[in-house]
Image: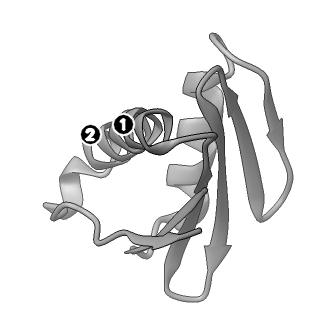
Amino acid sequence: MLMTADFATERATALMGTLGKHFGHKIPVQIADDKVLLQFEMGEATLTTTPTGLHLVLEGADDAQLERLRDVVESHLLRFAHREDPAPLTWTFQA
């Protein structure tokens, strides 16, 4: 199961790097120039920079794991982007 969202920001690269470094102390993380892969127990999160911000793709085995993954990734992103007064993300589900 997949879930996607976009986060508009001018600080996409910095936020992506902060998330990668933060989670890298706890889980396997792969960091590239424009992409970060976070490998959680409940699924994977891929963050990619776009011209307008970050594109997030979450993949989990079931609804419960996907929701848990969304909660972790979104809460950390919003916390690290606090200077931008961010709103909760709008997620799109894909089977």
Front-lying residue, 35 or 68: 68
Residue 33: quadrant of the picture = bottom right
Instruction: State the SS at label 2.
Output: helix
The residue that appears at 29% across and 39% down in the rendered structure is 75
Q: Which residue is mark 1?
A: 76
Measured along the vertical axis of the image, is residue 78 above or below residue 56?
above
Given residues 78 and 69, the one toward you in this image is: 69
Q: CA distance from mark 2 to mark 1?
A: 5 Å
The quadrant of the picture occupied by the N terminus is bottom right
Rendering coords of residue 85 (x, y %): 13, 61
In the rendered image, which quarter is residue 55 located in? Answer: bottom right
Residue 17 position in % (x across, y down): 63, 45
Judged from the image, the secondary structure of the residue bearing numbered disc 1 is helix
Q: Look at 68% across and 66% down and name the residue there.
A: 48
Using residue 65 as the reference point, say whether residue 48 is left or right of it.
right
When asked about the image quadrant of residue 72, the answer is top left
Residue that label 2 marks: 79
Q: Amino acid at mark 1?
A: His
Task: Tell me, yes or no, whether the two marked residues, 2 and 1, touch with CB atoms within 8 Å.
Answer: yes
In this rendering, would 37 be left or right of 13? right
- Mark number, residue 87: none
Q: Position of residue 82 (x, y in %)?
A: 21, 49
**Label 2 sits on what residue type?**
Arg
Q: Along the line of sight, which residue is nearer the eye, 77 or 72?
A: 72
Rendered image coloring scheme: one colour
Q: Residue at x 20, y 54 (%)?
A: 83
Circle 1: is it few (<14), some (14-19), or many (20+) Cα within 10 Å? some
